[in-house]
Each structure stands twice: as structure tokens, then as C-alpha cells.
Amino acid sequence: MTAPRRSDRLLLAIAALFAVSIAYGLTLDPIEASLRNSLRAPGLDFLFGTDHLGRDVLARIAHGFLRDVGLSLTIIAISFAIGIAMGMLAAELAGAFDRALTFVMDLMTSLPQIVIALILAAHLGGGELALILALSLTGWVKYARIARATAFSLREREFVTAARLAGGGRLYVLRRHILPHLLPLLSGLVALQFGHNILNIAALGFLGIGVQPPAPEWGAMIAEARPYFSRAPWLAIVPGIYLFVVTMVALMLTRRSGVRQERADANPQPAAPPR
């Protein structure tokens, strides 16, 4: 058995266990509190125990997963659209616009994304909308850099020059000839950013300026568990494990995407003839 097959099976096994627990947790109420069941240890009644308010930890983990994934995908969609548009326009317009965009990207990368997002989220008052805006406005830079570099390398290629000579406008050339070459290059970055977004969402939730209670969110769950860690360590350990698993799966998908891209670069396929 080859290494790629072993990693595929491991990924599938982790995903299956993860999906089963999430699916079961989604059938439970993550908000219902019962002080009589406060800080119950994991058992048959509550597989992952309960928190200080008697809420089912598995239910909060599962519903928090949906919330974090939804937020991460929304952030990726906004960052992707902004980054692709800005990168392609910088290569197409060049000149002052390209210099201005390069300056902004250098400025944005001079500080870690989480620091800038923390400042923006705190300034916007916290909450899901502030979280989305903060991470989107700092996450587009990586997409823009790749889009700009790729578009610059393609703008003088024969098929692009032919499209321009045939009367194709700027938007037509960007959409029909530049964008299709960009999308495969960004698949690995999307998977990587998905994992990073999950971590950033949890970090902002842990600091209290992300998703607000009583909505379930992994970072906020870990923050709420701090006063009870000596009595109920599962409150912090379980969401930490799920956070680690999601990030690990995202990194494995990123690695697989990188391997596929390297193989495609090593064995390029001839381009399809224009219609």
C-alpha cells in the first residue's frame, strides 16, 4: 500500500468518525440548560459531559461546528472574490494602480492577520458580522498576490494576445482566459485558509469579540471552561480536539492539492484548441 493511499484512508476514517459525532450532536439542543446536570462527566447520558449550566457539550460542539464552518466559508468567499478581482485588475491596469495595491498588500502583511482582525473586530463591536468583515478584509491579500503574479505571467502569452487582437475587451480576456488559469492554483490556498479561518474564529471567540453567547462556538467554549478546568477538563479538551482535527484535515487537503499541482506542472497537458 502506498503512502498516498494510507493518508487517504486515514483522512476518510477521521472524517467518518467526525461526521458521525457531528450528525448525532445536531439532533440535540445546544442551548437547553439544566443546573441539575451541571458539570456532568462524560457518560451514556451525555457522551461528552455537560458544562457549568448543564448544557450538552456534544450538542454545542456539533452546532458550533456548523457555525464555524459557515463563517469560514463566508469569509473565504468574500476574500476570494476581492483578492481575485484586485489581483487581476492590478496586472491588467498596471502602473499607479498596481503600485498602490502592492503598497497596501505589503502594509497588510507587515502584521499578522489575527492582530489586524482583532483590532478591526474590537473596533466594530464584536459579533458575527464584525468577525466576517474583520477576517475578510485581512484575508484577501494572499489571493490577490497569487492572482496578480499569475495574471502578469499570462498577459503576454500568445492566446491572450490573440484574444485581444480578435477584439476581446479587458473584462472578456480576464474572465475567459486569465481566470480559468487562476482557479486551480488557488484550490490549495482555499483549503489552507479554511483551517486558518477556523483557528482565527476560535481565537476571537476565546477573546470574547467573536461569536457571542449563548450561541455555541469552539473558542468561546474553551474560554468558558477556564474556571472549571480542574473539575471538568473535558469542557476545554473536547472542543480543542475538534479544533485540532478540523485544522489537520484542512492541512492534509492542502498538501494533497499541492501534490496534484506539482504533478500537473511536471506533466502538462496540451491546451484545448480555441473554438
Image (cartoon, rainbow, N blue to C red):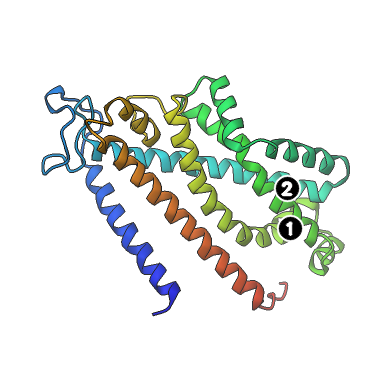
Q: Which mark is residue 17?
A: none
* Mark 2: secondary structure: helix
Q: Residue at x 44, y 50 (%)?
A: 247
List x then y, in percent, for residue 162.
83, 67
CA separation, marks 2 and 1? 9 Å
What is the crowding at mark 2: few (fewer than 14 residues within 10 Å), some, or many (at least 20)? many
Residue 172 visible? The answer is no
* Mark 1: secondary structure: helix
Q: Residue at x 20, y 33 (%)?
A: 50
Q: In the image, is residue 134 above or below residue 257?
A: above
**On the picture, is 149 further left or further right than 166?**
left
Q: Residue at x 52, y 33 (%)?
A: 132
Chain-order first, disc 2 or disc 1: 2
| Marker count (numbered) | 2
Disc 2 marks which residue? 87
Q: Which mark is residue 150?
A: 1
What amino acid does circle 1 point to? Answer: Thr
**On the picture, is 31 further left or further right than 207?**
left
List x then y, in percent, for residue 24.
22, 47
